[in-house]
Amino acid sequence: MDNSAQAWQSRKLTETYLQGVRGAIPFAGEQIDVMLRVIGAARPDAGLVLDLGCGDGILAQAILDRFPAAQLVLLDFSEPMLEMAKERLLGYDSAAFGLVDYSDPSWLKDAYGENAQRPGYDVIVSGFSIHHQPDSRKRQLYQELYDLLKPGGLFLNLEHVASSSAWGESLFADYFIDALYDYQQRQGAELSREEVDRRYYSRPDKAANILAPVETQCQWLREIGFERVDCFLKIFELALFGGVKGA
């Protein structure tokens, strides 16, 4: 784990992200709704589901609410995030948790967290997490996730991806800074847009972002053996993509 990724071990940064950034993500509700629709179409009887890089458990909660029979395994390398996920999922009896660093393939020995079952996953999801890995590790990880899935199992990645040009990157930055500013205003913060802009470009986790184009990542999935690979939703640099393990 490099120093930039170590930033997420800080509870202060974790709380800053969850309270000041995550709520500003454009179309966050629609992203989750599309994710649930794809799960419902591919695996309506989803049993065992992995949320890799689970953060505070927002995706896992949405899945449990839509598919109450599912068994969720939530894995993350950030202890503060896992603590918040456990708080969010209090009252849900079908969630197991594990502290893992999937930057190294040795994470696979703990790929089921507290869940002792190893039947293969019906669904694997990840949200704004894998982009912290170098491209070579991203592709290797996608192979590991493919191997963890049952035949017909679904992988979905809700992710921050690279723009195809500096122009697109600039468009996304302006769009997201506007969203951050509007969100901060609704929360009663007295920040100018210029201050929001400065904080966006100087944020401590920026160096941990290693972005790859969604087209490239979809091609990796196809080469690994995933079928029905698609980008199901894209808003500038925010994308939901994935595929199904062939039978």
Image (cartoon, helix red, strand yellow):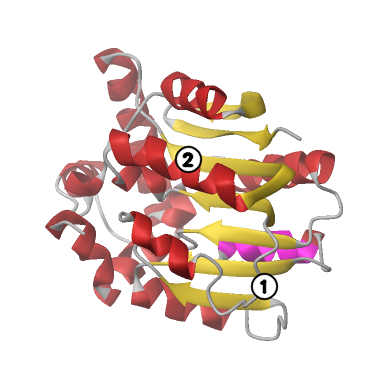
Residue at 42% over, 44% down: 141
**Which stretch appears magenta?**
58-65
Residue 80 in the image: above or below residue 194: below
What secondary structure is the stretch in magenta mostly built from? helix
Element marked by disc 2: helix
Q: Nearer the viewer, residue 48 or 128?
A: 48
Residue 185 in the image: above or below residue 137: below
| Left or right of 153, for residue 10 | left
Residue at 39% over, 63% down: 107
Query: Callout 2 environment at 10 Å: few (<14), some (14 to 19), or many (20+)?
Result: some
Q: Position of residue 185 (x, y in %)?
A: 39, 54
Badge nearest the viewer, 2 or 1: 1
Q: Position of residue 28 (x, y in %)?
A: 57, 46
* Amino acid type, label 2: Tyr
Mark yes or no: residue 195 visible. no
* Amino acid type, label 1: Gln
Q: Is residue 2 magenta?
A: no
Residue 191 in the image: above or below residue 241: below
The CA span between labels 2 and 1 is: 21 Å
Label 1 sits on residue = 117
Disc on the earlier residue, 2 or 1: 1
Element marked by disc 1: loop
Label 2 sits on residue = 142
Residue at 14% over, 47% down: 202
Which quadrant of the structure image shows residue 70?
Answer: bottom right
Residue at 48% over, 40% down: 143
Which quadrant of the structure image shows residue 217?
Answer: top left
Q: Nearer the viewer, residue 166 or 100?
A: 100
